[in-house]
Amino acid sequence: KQEVTQIPAALSVPEGENLVLNCSFTDSAIYNLQWFRQDPGKGLTSLLLIQSSQREQTSGRLNASLDKSSGRSTLYIAASQPGDSATYLCAVREGGGADGLTFGKGTHLIIQP
Amino acid sequence: GAVVSQHPSWVICKSGTSVKIECRSLDFQATTMFWYRQFPKQSLMLMATSNEGSKATYEQGVEKDKFLINHASLTLSTLTVTSAHPEDSSFYICSATWGAGGVQPQHFGDGTRLSIL
């Protein structure tokens, strides 16, 4: 059964720093991997989607990489801002079509002003 | 684009009540909708997969008679928690996607926080 682990569970850094969030998954036979942001008591906002054939995706200050063979993905946040404070979730999709996502527990990120 | 609306956002009700949660795709036709549940400090767990016009597929351990899912149109899926009990208190969230092959991302609603007294 697929398991997704996110490290660290929590992270607090000063504003302006660059940071890396890690995600690992046990079964490398994934279809794609998605990074989300979840604010307290809110739903999920999709940040980046990486297909299994891709190595990375970029959106603004965010860059996500995927090493499918080793079962790892990283989310790089450049020049962090207090508004980036949230829980970041990594999720993998194991099949196309009608397959749901398997989520990690998330990394709770606090950016200190 | 790709907005998913979930209603209600909060529900507090007595034990034994049935609660219906709606999930709507506002600007696209969702061929597949998913229902997840998240307990405190836990990851989101997939409960069931719903394809328009078909019976939902439930994950192992999820009671299909307790969690009734209806996906009657390409823009609406509903989850009914029947005879809810305190242990059903959780954060329920839906997602929707379109197309075959799983290329498109899943787009999530804002979730429903259910509290059973």
Image (spheres, coloured by chain):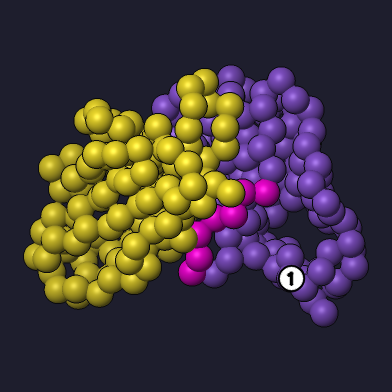
Chain colours: A purple, B yellow
Provide residue B7's location: percent of width, then percent of height.
Answer: 34, 62
Left or right: B8 as drawn, with respect to B4: left
Provide residue B40's location: percent of width, then percent of height.
Answer: 43, 63
Residue A72 makes an appearance in the image: no
Quadrant in the picture for the C terminus of chain A: bottom right
Provide residue B99's location: percent of width, then percent of height.
Answer: 49, 27
Image: A104 above or below A70: below
Provide residue A107's location: percent of width, then percent of height.
Answer: 65, 56
Task: Report the residue that reaches farthest toward the bottom.
Answer: A113
- Total numbered circles: 1
Q: Amino acid at mark 1?
A: Gly
Image: B14 above or below A86: below
* Residue behind mark 1: A83
Left or right: B33 as drawn, with respect to A110: left
Residue A10 lies in quadrant = bottom right
Mark 1 neighbour density, 10 Å: few (under 14) some (14–19) many (20 or more): few
Region of the chain picked out in magenta, as a range: A41-47
Which residue appears at 28% of the width and 57% of the height? B21
Left or right: A74 as drawn, with respect to A5: right
Judged from the image, the secondary structure of the residue bearing numbered disc 1 is helix
Residue B67 lies in the magenta-colored region: no
Which residue appears at 62% of the width and 40% of the height? A34
